[in-house]
Amino acid sequence: MLLDANRLATELEALPGWSAVGPASPGPRSGGSEATGVTREGDASGGPAARARGGGRIRQSPDAITRTVETESFPAAIALVNAVAEAAEAADHHPDIDIRWRTVTFSLSTHSAGGVTSKDIAMAAKINELTR
């Protein structure tokens, strides 16, 4: 089950370094932003966005959570990725991983659910343990 924006904001407070990305990120069409949710102006066509909260604004959960880690060296970055790979296999929940020399970016989303779930929060916590 997808986490709503309020619950995700609470979960992210306990996960240093992680942030939300996706529709909840401020963009040119957003009406504003809150910690992890975006409020978008209603749709003039009278569609669901226009009806949400009395014709005003809707709050959306993000597509993913992400964290970037700077390591001491390229071999340290690879060692971190290998440790995360083992944890991901054990949990059967795999992050997207981008390695750029000493910089590793992890992105978590439950694709089958279409966004962030408790599985992503649990894997983010495990990644935080491994980066200490």
Image: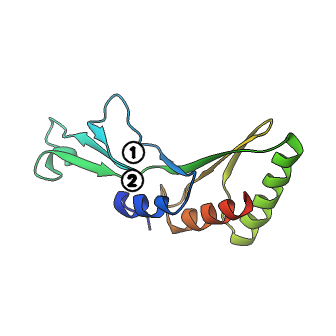
Q: Residue at x 48, y 58 (%)?
A: 12
Residue pictured at 79% horizontal, 39% vertical:
102
Classify residue 73 by image quadrant.
top right
Q: Is residue 72 above or below residue 79?
A: above
- Most extreme residue toward the right is 75
Residue 31 locus on image (x, y percent): 26, 36
Element carrying mark 2: loop
**Residue occupying image coordinates x 15% and y 36%:** 45
Q: Amino acid at mark 2?
A: Ser
How many marks are shown on the rendered structure?
2
Left or right: 49 with respect to 77? left
Do callouts 1 and 2 mark residues in contact (Cβ within 8 Å)? yes
Percent position (x, y) of residue 7?
A: 39, 64
Q: Which residue is mark 2?
A: 61
Q: Nearer the viewer, residue 99 or 77?
A: 77
Q: Is residue 125 left or right of 10 when viewed as pictured?
A: right
Q: Nearer the viewer, residue 47 or 13?
A: 13
Residue 47 percent across, percent down from the top left: 18, 44
| Residue receiving disc 1 | 24
Q: Earlier in the sequence, mark 1 or mark 2?
A: 1
Gap between marks 1 and 2 measured at Cα: 6 Å
Q: Quadrant of residue 40?
A: top left
Callout 1, which amino acid? Ala
The crowding category of the residue bearing disc 1, from other C-alpha atoms within 10 Å (few below 14, some 14 to 19, many at least 20), is many
Residue 19, horizontal then vertical, whole percent: 51, 49
Left or right side of 45 for 111: right
**Relative to 89, does residue 100 appear above or below in the rendering?**
above
Q: Specify the quadrant that holds the C terminus.
A: bottom right
